[in-house]
Amino acid sequence: MQPLANTRHEVFAHARVAGLTIDAAYIDAGYKPNRSNAARMNTNEHIQQRIKELQDAAAKLAEIDAALVLDEIARLAFSDIRELFDQNGSLLPVAAIPERAAKAVQSIKVSSKRVPGSAADETIVTTEIKFWDKNAALGQLFKHFGLCEQNDRDDPVAAFVQALMGAARPLPVATAGDGAR
């Protein structure tokens, strides 16, 4: 994918891919406003081919980005704290924590406190591990895969209609003895 030799044409193609109108892209490329010249440039075969190449590259990049974001959300949603510890229950050194588990950790706080009244200088070391919000990650996955059912709480109009239906009284039914013919 080679850039166009004419830099103005290349700028025009990039501006079109960025969503500018034909006229705006023409001006952005450094030309004086001229609607017919802009339209003619837009139909130029090598410019159209370059626009298609740029759009294809952007689409591919968007797919990669979307896949990476989805993978990252899945890491958080399915993280397991046990990956941070060895067989004896001791916290692994930071360098030994698997990448998958490390990406799910928001912070690790280590603090030490001297034990009051101890003869020796005894200290208690406390390690706090905070993970990114697992519920939010699961919620995002549910939405992405369409696993959430919409309910009345999510739709105020449906909730209003449901409330009206519940408050509505049935219409009286006319009987033959009421004078109905």
Image: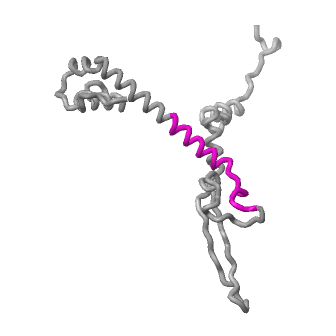
Residue in the image at 41% along x and 28% along y: 55
Q: Is residue 91 left or right of residue 50?
A: right
Q: Main secondary structure of the magenta part?
A: helix
- State the image quarter where residue 112 is shown: bottom right
Q: For the view shown, which residue lies furthest in the right direction?
A: 177
| Residue 181 point in image, percent of width and height | 76, 7
Residue in the image at 71% along x and 90% along y: 120
What colour scheme was applied to this rendering of the protein? one colour
Q: For the view shown, which residue lies furthest in the left direction?
A: 32
- State the image quarter where residue 131 is shown: bottom right
Q: Is residue 130 left or right of residue 22?
A: right
- State the image quarter where residue 43 is shown: top left
Residue 73: in magenta span: yes
* Residue nearest the observer in this picture, 21 or 85: 85
Quadrant location of the N terminus? top left
* Residue nearest the observer in this picture, 143 or 4: 4
| Residue 28 point in image, percent of width and height | 24, 32
The part of the chain drawn in magenta is 63-86
| Residue 94 point in image, percent of width and height | 61, 63
Work out whether 42 lies above or below 131.
above
